[in-house]
Amino acid sequence: MKLNWSYFVRLRFLGGLLVFLTSTSPIFADDQTPTYSLPSQPSLNFYGLPGGIDTPSAVPLPDGQLAIGVSTFAGTTRTTLSFQATPRISASFRYVGIQNFNSGGFATFRDRSFDLKYLAVREGKYRPAVSIGLQDFSGTGIYASEYIVATKNFNTAKFGKISISGGLGWGRLGSDGSIGTPFGGSRPSFDTSENGGSPSTDQWFRGEAAPFASIEWQVSDKLGIKAEYSSDAYDLETQLGIFERRSPLNFGVEYQYSDRLRLGGYYLYGSEIGFNAQLQLNPKRALTPLKVKAPRTVVIRPSRQVNPDAWRTDWAASESAPATLRDIIAPKLAGEGLRLESLQVRATSVELRVSNQRYNSSVPPIGRSARILAEILPPSVETFVITQVGNGLALSSVTIRRSDLEALEFQPNAANALLAVSGISDAAPQLEDSVSPPDLFPQLSYSLGPYLSPSFFDPDEPARADFGISAQFRYQPARGWTIAGELRHRLTGNVEDSERLSNSVLPRVRTDTILFARAADTTLNNLYASKQWKPRSNVFARVSAGYFESMFGGISTEVLWKPVNSKLALGVEANYAQQRDFNQRLGFQSYGVATGHVSAYYEFGNGYLGQLDVGRYLAGDVGATVTLSREFKNGWELGGFFTLTDVSSEDFGEGSFDKGISFSIPINWFLGKPSKQTISTVIRPVQRDGGARLIVPGRLYEQVRGAHVNGLSDDWARVWE
């Protein structure tokens, strides 16, 4: 271990700060004010992370929080998306533009990077929070650094809320005021010719280390003041003449404009003025609270002792009874956004098969169907079996005793009590001796509306988009059969204006996006037919053919094994894909490829999902994709993925391997009305040809899992909704 004693005073400063943070003396307290307070929504630094101005703090975001930070100073603009994936782990994706970057021939240098941060020690009454972070650990490395930081928060009546942080940084954060190399080693300087994308594990916590510190004073609910000592020397920027760093001290004032938006102005490094806008959203708290029509109360049967005739069962012998009950039940279900698929009636039991047309959860249809059955069926029917059907697939059966429904509706903890006495089981592929509505098939739905097709991270234009009109249709001629398509007409946009044509050495399965955008304004985005069925218990199957996406069509087959009470699911998919003409009409190009994957899916609990896909990709490369995501009870889902194949990083090109972030946001989060629609997108730092997977509409796992045991039990509180 090497130690630079000329900077011993800085080490003493850091040590003194840590002693202060861990002191048992409540310095800022008085008799009436508690000394321990965690901020409900910490402010963000210029990297879009909780922190001072240009340095981090140890404070995490609230669990599940999504934060977007946009900061600018000295010709540098950073846009960061951060997500508190677990109470201890946060992940960030950052996109940066640095003007006047005259190294490597860049007028404006644009860079993408990822961060990870781990809360090692939670804050206590006298104990500071301690976090360990990796900054730009998987990019080109222009902002690469690692840090250990401690933070203590104080809530006082006299001074307001005060947060003090101090830490030790490496890389960027170890470039000014070094105290030596605590863990030895050296770090290479930033190289603009590197592809980036691969974690440089051999550099983590290596080389020079330096202390940094910050203090934040929340004067009132609206006003905050910050000051910090930064250990970032900005060597590259000062060498290139981008700005002059005259001081390690930064100062700022921030204004909490609303619960979600915070704005700030700053004086940085003795020479620059900067600005920061911080937007924080939590998927758990909708922009518009969900408003649903109040459900009907459970109709209580008359007492058998008082009215024994009402409990007679001879009604079930009538051949017309099933159809009569079907015709009464079906319109009431339709009023609740549900479609009656089939009905099997017995003297003491009934099975209702229903498809959900309205809710983004599989639980409300159970409760609402049960109430309708309790209102209409004769008193002798004690057992309700409610089976949910999706696109011809019988997903699961929930068995509820009518007497439990009657007894528990207004009891404390009614949802958990009902779940405890109900059963969730696999559903038979077909329901024998049942009646279905005569107009069940064919079914036709269609829509006409706007579409927005974005394209991100072009070095010449960070965000491009096409906007136009989309016409979609969906036709179901029989159970399990679907014919669907989408026609688009572009009204305006600039995706085609990009000059960044592909230089890929692999088959160009994804990097010819610009050529597809230039070829035509009116395109057939997709047109396909599919058949889904359930060949046996716990097994689901699909066959699809047609134009699956804008770039490829072909034939796709899939089989999924998913027991109703299992956290694990296994699937096999085999496809033959042919590349479409650039004009996205009916023609194909000469390139075709056999592609497919073996997949494993696992539900870890509390909304955390994992997926592993192993197989062959569109460019003919072979490898695996790992996906981790988190789903919230209201339907939000956020995740990240990476793909490693037998394509070398050199052949892959910029980014080294495929990786990205996915979002799925339910429409009802914005509108406050029940809806199954979602807004979904995938953000990739770089779209290359390696690790590219065929996009196939209607893959089975997402259709199935929400109606199985884990999906139902996690959201069971909505059964009384």
Image (tube, helix red, strand yellow):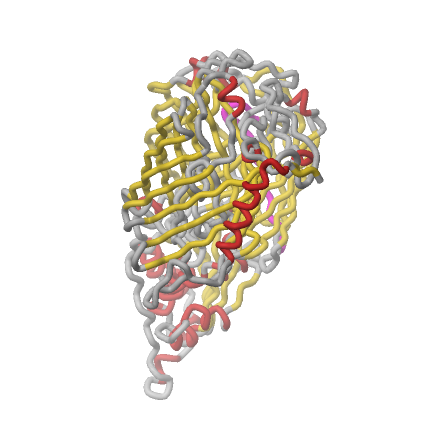
Q: Position of residue 121 (x, y in %)?
A: 55, 55
Task: Name the residue: 46% across, 13% down.
Answer: 107
Task: Name the residue: 32% across, 39% down.
Answer: 253
Q: Is residue 631 at least partly visible in the picture?
A: no
Q: Is residue 172 left or right of residue 225?
A: right
| Occupied quadrant, residue 596 | top right
Q: Position of residue 504 (x, y in %)?
A: 62, 16
Residue closest to the far bottom: 305
| Occupied quadrant, residue 262 | top left
Q: Is residue 13 left or right of residue 448?
A: right
Please check the rendered image and state whether residue 542 is part of the magenta-colored stretch, yes or no: yes
Q: Quadrant of the C terminus?
A: bottom left
Q: How many marks?
A: 0
Foreground of the two, 205 or 594: 205
Q: Is residue 534 left or right of residue 123?
A: right
Please check the rendered image and state whether residue 223 is part of the magenta-colored stretch, yes or no: no
**Residues in magenta, as a range:** 537-553
Q: Position of residue 231 (x, y in %)?
A: 51, 35
Foreground of the two, 15 or 440: 15
Foreground of the two, 370 or 442: 370
Question: Image height check: is 336 above or below 315?
Answer: above
Q: Position of residue 197 (x, y in %)?
A: 61, 29
Foreground of the two, 165 or 73: 165
